[in-house]
Structure formats: structure tokens, C-alpha cells
Image (spheres, rainbow, N blue to C red):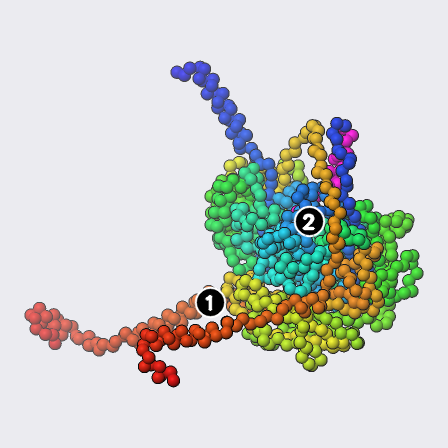
Amino acid sequence: NINPCVQIIIHLLSVISQNSAGQFFSSGHTNNWAVLVCTSRFWFNYRHVANTLSVYRSVKRLGIPDSHIVLMLADDMACNHRNPKPATVFSHKNMELNVYGDDVEVDYRGYEVTVENFLRVLTGRLPPSTPRSKRLLSDDRSNILIYLTGHGGNGFLKFQDSEEISNVELADAFEQMWQKRRYNELLFIIDTCQGASMYERFYSPNIMALASSQVGEDSLSHQPDLAIGVHLMDRYTFYMLEFLEDIHPASKTNMNDLFKVCPKSQCVSTPGHRTDLFLRDPGSVLITDFFGSVRKVELTMDAINLTDPINPVNGEEQKEVYSYADQLPVSEIIHQKPKQKDWHPPDGFILGLWTLILLVFFKTYGIKHLKHIF
Amino acid sequence: CVCACMSATVDAAADIQGTSAPETVVPSSVPQPKDDFQEELVIRPLHSGDIYASFQFRTLWDTDFMRENKVSHYRLFPKSLGQVISKFSVRELHISFTQGYWRTMQWGQPFIPSPPGAELWVWFQDSVTDVDATWKELTNVLSGIFCASLNFIDSTNTVQPSASFKPLGLGNVTDHSFLRYATLPREIVCTENLTPWKKLLPCGSKAGLAVLLKSEKLFHSSFHSQAVHIRSVCQDWQCKTTSWELRQTLNSVFDLHNSGQTKREWSLFKMFSRTLTEACPLASSSKLYIDITDNPQVTTSLLSQAVVLGDRRTFSVYDLTQETTFGTVRSLNLLIRWKSNEGEMLRPLLHAERYVAGYGLQTGEIHTLMYNNHPYRSFPVLLLDSVPWYLRLYIHTLSVTSKGKDNKPSYIHYEPSKDRVKPHLLEMLIQLPPNSVTEVTVQFERALLKWTEYPPDPNHGFYVGSSVISSLVPSTVAMHTNSTRERPLFSSFFPCKEESSYFVRIYTEPLLVNLPTPDFSMPYNVICLTCTVVAVGYGSLYNLLTRSFQIEEPNPGLAKRIANVIRRMRGVPPL
């Protein structure tokens, strides 16, 4: 028997909370970041660099600027001396599409791509002198796309043929990111052998993961190019690139379509995905939420007053005359080093020292030992 | 990488505001920063059929980065570099990225020399208190600007030369404790380094000579080098005021056979796959020079002469700021064709080589050869060697010989290395006798690194940076010592103090040395093998030591066994 006023209040409160819940569950991100990592070294792993660069190309095309992309390539394929067409990385045979392009900015390259640097980028624990382009400056309203490719196994991913990152480490890094409020939503894509093992251990909320193969399966490469001599791309990323080429910044395609990319008939391996940690329904998540970039633009019609600029002080006439330095002043160089005199202890010092030692000796043991000396 | 946003947009916005809201006052009495931008391209056909193209972009700016009020209005000078100069109190900065090695004997001397890989040398102002900390921060910031792994520069590959690398700009103080020099011979150059380099130019790669800089052609060359040089220069002949000069240089040598050609016929389109359409609107001068000294029967428009690298060369000049240069098609594509063997190439007077001798993975010997090809003049050279700590040099085996006889250097500076802290530094001033070969040899021993210090591909080897040889080479024509005379950029890089010689700096090859490397791919097999051997060996030894043999009675028959049981019950000893 509830008071009707209270009933109305309860009803109102539930409506309000439903609205705020609805607001809470729609995508509330304000900026997009991407961390794209290729972990393999050596020329025969050309396809991993091509994978990463094709995702980079799609992400740039859909609007994420270079300042929001951390691109890590473990080896240089474009200017490798074995590349018959320098400064290019192709994804299709017959050299149709150059994914390297003319405007690429690689943030971590060569030996810098290590497990430590990757985890430091994710968690933000970088030395203070690291430049901005090498940092992941995300906040709690950022949607981050993380793409890893390379050689992997059940529970690990190999970095540069010399170290590994395990799925437990990766899950813990994501948990650190969640606790430090470094992401709003995270999309994790991995294209390696047994890739599904890498997302098995995630436990932080708001993570959606895709992998190119299940545990026990190998991810296969797509096609070799006879002129370049190596396989150009992996199958999963090749079909994903084809899928992404149809996306434009205003398209409404959602994640369910991305899950259908590369079925077993094309990929030979079974791609997998994991959405249980993600709060929203994958059908309502747009591809451009992660691959594109949201820029909230605030229009203003007000005029802004510019302050008076600093008037440069006209320096008083310098009295001294400058001159260029002599590039090879031979005589100056020869006389630069004064001849170093060896330091000798003052005269008589050593003699005095020995006398002291002898005196102490004879004081302790008596004068009769003197005959042993002479 | 940092985008160098030009302040031209600020001017445009101010214009728009000026028309719509007249009450917004943009003061017009602001003295505009006096800056100037020049660009030029020099093309020199080489004797071997290759062609050498050298771009130089120079921005001069009359400002003071070191004063208290921060400079905030940038026009032609890139903001990212201006902030670097003021934040780190830089007096001079030279950074270069090179792919390939300059072959002096086939190509002659370059206009701007550079070693393979990345090289960075910086003079700091004398107001800097902790030079090493500032150096470390500077390398990190530059690695972000140029997208290169310059953060690998640390104390193990930084040296402080005591006599080489005098400042190329103005200044009266030359205390070498403010100089740092480092080189990364393994650093690769690719489009990701060219892109931010192009963004530093006022016109970017949209107009002027920079439209020719397309990476697919530039990196398909025998030699590619891009550099940034910042220094302060005299404004006028009195030299009482200074201005900052930023030079961006790009040198490329295109190979005749690599590009699939047979005839010595090159054009701008063949080299760069682009033609020129206009000069950069912000440039005060935009010129294209073709070196025709070796092929004087050219009958084109403007000719000019310049003294460069000790020689007087004739150039055919095209001024891109004139509309007539582009003709009716509004594009300029030059065709350069020359015959081979038109006389002997002038042999370079100074030339150097370096190699590692010896066998095995324990010891070796570094040989540096310097050739003086002048018939009767001798000149001094300053050799700078920086060897990493894992090659332990035995300096007592250092020997300098010319023409078979010992040649004692008049100045030697040696700083021994400290394991994992700093490298060896060896500087020597040697007088090269005329027409001779001087050989510098030193023996070394290879160190065994800790297993975490090996790079992921240790079997590739370890690089030793190029030696730097600075020298005053006698010139065949009188050099101009007046630094403010109007002359092309390529002849005014190194300041000239006397007329009879010119300064040149050459770099030797970097060395690739194999260190004793453990076999990283066999730990599992080794552990299995070792465990098996230990188990078999220890097991056998243990058995041998502790096993004793006992004689066992044969099994008695059933009757006897029952009788033994009864006897045991009775307490009587068994049968």
C-alpha cells in the first residue's frame, strides 16, 4: 500500500536512471588511438610488416591521425637491400597496392620493438624524455585498437625471435590500463598461429578480441609474389583489408560483420572472437568506433581578442665582432697538450719512509736484529 | 612524429577576422621576423655514368633563441627545431642519415660529406651545466622528430673529440667539453625519415624543388643522404650581428645500371619521376645548376662559374623564379647526355680506406689507409677513430707508417674505453707526405658479451663507426675567403680561412666485426644432452661405488621348504 506520491517519485527515478543507463551504455568515446605492432624480424617475415602496414593504412584512411597511432615495426622491409622495389611494401601480388605509401611515420623500429617497450607504451610507464609520438596518451574516453602480428604459439607471442610475451602478461597489462583509466573500450586483434590463446586470459571489462586462428591451428599466409620472392600477407589480414577497403568514415557497418570476415573456406584456420567482457552488444558497435576517429568539433561565433605580441627588444649594438672558427688549426692542436710531467713524491720522502719503518721495527724487536740487515 | 605546423595559417585566420569583426585589432606595427629561404639543386654527371644530385634548402632567420622571452612567432623556420634549439641551448647541430657509402675514387668529393648510418654532433652553449644529461634528452627528442631510433645514442657510443669537429658557425669559444659526437652505423633510412624531413621545409613537398623528392626513386639509388645543419652565421661583412641558418641537404647518386639504362642519358623525369613546375613561392631564390665543366660544348642560356672543392667549375644555371624558365608547357624537364671517357677524371687528392685484418674470433687488426695523391705537396690530416668497448684495442701496437717508414703523429689524444660505459677515442694529427699511402694499424681483441647484451640477430655482426678524417687540402685555384659574398649554397658550407687550401672531411667505411656469439637456438637440446650425460655418468658411478654383490642360494625344493618352516617353528637352524 504505497503512497501514490512515492509511487510517482519511484517511477520518475526509474525513468531517469534508465535514461542515464542508456547514456552510459552508448559509446561515449571522444578520441581514438591505435597501437599497431609487427613483432617479426628478417626478410622472410615480410608478410607481418605488410599486415601491420595495411591496418595502418586503413586506420589512417578512416581518420585517425599519425599523432594518435603508435606504429611498431621490428624490421625494415621497404628499404631492405633484398627488396627489388625499394621504399615499397606490397600487399597484393603483381604489386597492386603499396601499403607503405609516401606519408608513413614509424614510431618504434628495429631493435626498439621489445616486449618491455610494448608494455611500457600500453601502461604509460615511459622515461620522461620519451617524445610524444612514442607515447600512448589515451584517457578514459579513448577507444584503442591494438593489432599484433607475428609468430606465436599457445599462450605466447614471439618478439624478434629472441623473447616472448605471454597471454598472462598481456592480460595484466590491460588490467593496469583499466585501473589507470587509460581506455574506454579496447579492440584487440591478433593475427598469429594459435592466436585465440592470447585473449583467453583477459579479465578486464570492455575488451573485445579477435584472433585469426584457434588454439592448435596455424594461421596461414596468403600468396607469394615471384618477383619479391616471399609471401606478401597473411590470409586473415588480407581479407580483413579487403573488408576495410569498403568502409568509409560515415559507414554504419558493425562488429558482427567483422566477425564474419575470413570464414574457414578462405582462411583455412577458424577465426575466433571474444565479446563476453564487452558491455555493449557487438551489433551496436560500429567499425568506425575503433578504426575511424571521432572528433568533437565545437563551433563558436565569438571573436577572440589577440593580446599584443611581445615587442622584440632591439639589442644594443654588439661591440664584439664574431668570426668563424678555424677548422683545422694545426699549430693550436699540436700545442694543445702540455707535456705531462710525471708526478714524483718529494725528494727524500721515500728515504724517510724507509727509515721510519726500520726504526719502528727495531724499537719493537730490539737492536740485535740489526745484524741481519747488514 | 611532430607535425611542423606553419604559422601561415595564423596569418590567414587574422585576415578573416579582420574583415568580419573590425573591432579585433591585429597590430600592424609588429616587426616581421627577418627570414629568408633559398633552395637550389646541383646536378653533376659523374665519370662512371652515374649522376649526382644535391639539394640544398637554406632558411636564414635573424632572431635570438637564447633570450628570456620565448620566440613564439615562426614563419619559415620550423617550430619543432626552433623549440629544440631554445630548450637545449644548442649552439650548433648537425644530423645526417645516410644509406650507402660514398665512393670517392669513382665519384669525386661530395659537397656535403656524411658517413653511412646516422651521425649527430652538437655544440652546446656554454650556459649548459650538465652536458651529458642535455645530450641524452636531445637525442630522445630528435628521435621523435625524425622517426629514427636515435635514443640508442648513449654513453657507450658518444665521444667528445678534442680537436676534430670545430664549430662550423660563429663563436669565439671552442671549449671541447661542450661538444658531443655520436654515430649509429646500423641506422636505416627510409620514407619514414624522409617524411618528417620534408615537413620541415616551408613549402613542404608541394612546391619548388621539393616536389622532386619522391621516395620510390630516391631510395632506389646507390647513395642517399639527408641532413639537417643548424648554425649561426654572419649577417653581413661586418659580422657584428648573427642570424641562425638552417640548411637541409639531400644528396643522391643514381646508378646507371640499376635504373636499367645503357646510354649516359639522364633527365629529371628519369631521376625523380617528376618535373619542375614552379618555384616555392616563399623562396627568395630557387635555382638549378648543372655542372658542365667536363662537357663544355653546351650552348644553353646562363652560365656561371663557382669555386667549389678547390676547383673552378662551370655551371649552367636555370632560375626557377622566372616564368620563362618553364616555357609554354609550364614544366621543366632537363635532359643531360654525355659521352664516356671524355678525359681523365681528376683524381681526388685525399682518399681513405679501412678494413679489418686477421682471422678467428679472438683477435684482429684494424688497418686505415690514407692516400695523398698530390704530386708534391704534403698536408696534415686529423684522424678520429671511435671504437666500441667490446673491441679491446691494444694501443701499444699502434703504428703509423708512410712509404714504409715510421711517421710519428704530432698530436695524439687517446681516451681508453671502459667496459659498458664508454668507447675508445683515438685522435691523431698526421702529416701525409706527397704521393704516398699512410697506413695506421692497431691490434684488438674481441670481448665476450653477456648473453642479454646481444641484439636479436647477433650473427649479422657488430658495426664499428666510420673514421673521420679532417684535412686542409691544397687547392688548385684560389678559394674565396670572404664569407658574405653572394655565392651558391653548395660552395659556402665550409668556412674558408685561407686561399690556398680548403677544408674537407671524409669518412671511411664502417667495419662489420663478428664477435664470439653463443648459439642461442640450442638451449633445449643442450639441456637434454647434458642431463642425459649427467644421469648416465652419475648413475653409473653411483652404482659402481655403492653396489655390492651378494650370493643368493638357489631356490630349494618344496619338501625342503616345508621342513625349513617346521624347523623355524621349533627354533632350530634351517637346512
Label 1: few (<14), some or many (≥20) within 10 Å?
few
Q: Nearer the viewer, residue B470 or B211?
A: B470
The percent coordinates of residue B279 (x first, y second) are 83, 49
Residue B525's disc is 1
Nearer-the-camera pick, B43 or B87 = B87
Residue A310, by quadrant, is top right
SS at badge 2:
helix
Q: Is residue B256 left or right of residue B84?
A: right
Q: CA distance from mark 1 to mark 2?
A: 53 Å
Q: Foreground mark, 1 or 2?
A: 2
Q: How many marks?
A: 2
Q: Quadrant of residue B6?
A: top right
**Magenta stretch, residue numbers:** B1-21
Residue B345 location (% of width, % of height): 82, 70
Q: Classify the position of the C terminus of chain B by image quarter.
A: bottom left
Q: Residue at x 49, y 66 (%)?
A: B522
Q: Amino acid at mark 1?
A: Asn
Q: Nearer the viewer, residue B547 or B484?
A: B484
Q: Residue B15, position in %: x, y? A: 77, 34
Q: Residues within 10 Å of mark 2 (few under 14, many from 20)?
A: some
Residue at 68% x, 81% y is B405
Residue B53 position (above or below residue B382): above
Q: Which residue is mark 2?
A: B81
In the image, A217 versus A317, the foreground residue is A317
Which secondary structure class fits the magenta region best? helix
Q: Earlier in the sequence, mark 1 or mark 2?
A: 2
In the displayed structure, A113 sits above or below A349; it is above
